[in-house]
Image (cartoon, helix red, strand yellow):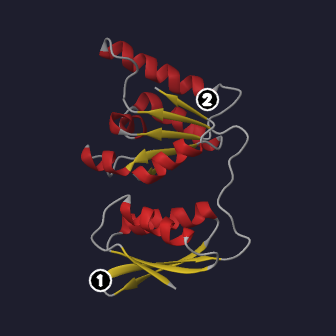
Amino acid sequence: MIEVNAVGLVCPVPVIMTKKALNTIEEGEVSILVDNETSKENLEKLAKEMGYSYVSSKKDENIQVIITKTLGEKEEKLEEENIVVVIDSDEMGKGDRELGEVLIKGFVYSLTEMETLPKSIILYNKGVFLATKNENTIEDLKKLEEMGVEIISCGTCVNYYGLQESLRVGTLTNMYTILDRQMKATKVVRV
């Protein structure tokens, strides 16, 4: 069993350390020690996305996540069309704010009407307001999520803006996952 001590380390370091450890073995277990719930959840997401089983438990003052990799399991394959939409603001464009808010609302709504849907929508920086405070976009994002689109918001950004209790659609994620989604995309649309 490979042991990874990620106590005291913040996102995305525990995920990166774990992925590196998993890449060094064909099969077996990687035991990761973390000290916060967010890191535990990020490691569980990593295991699920890679198709590996995992078990989480308390260990003294910390949390232990054991990920089991067996032969025949593989990382998620790219689909033929893997479009990722990245939104980093609560308005579209750099002109008038009121116009920018109208445009972003129209953009998100238009996504619900597209024949080809994106696989993921990534919200970071002020883009996280679209899934937390912006009543004009939350319902359309919920509709997209129901249609199978992954809606993910940067956890660091949500914390920075004090919106931890305000997430209304999608899930929180980390910078490693944000980069991973874009690297695996066949097309990235930046707003």
Please state which amino acid type lies under the numbered disc 1.
Glu
Q: Nearer the viewer, residue 120 or 8?
A: 8
Q: State which tag comes first along the sequence, 2 or 1.
A: 1
Q: Which mark is residue 112?
A: 2
Residue 19 percent location from the top left of the image: 50, 65
Please state which amino acid type lies under the numbered disc 2.
Thr
Q: Nearer the viewer, residue 106 or 86?
A: 86
Q: Which mark is residue 181?
A: none
- Classify residue 129 by image quadrant: top left
Residue 173 visible in the displayed image:
no
Q: Which mark is residue 61?
A: 1
SS type, badge 2: helix
- Left or right side of 42 for 36: left
Q: Is residue 149 positioned above or below 1 on the image? A: above
SS type, badge 1: loop
Q: Residue at x 52, y 86 (%)?
A: 1
Q: Nearer the viewer, residue 173 or 134?
A: 173
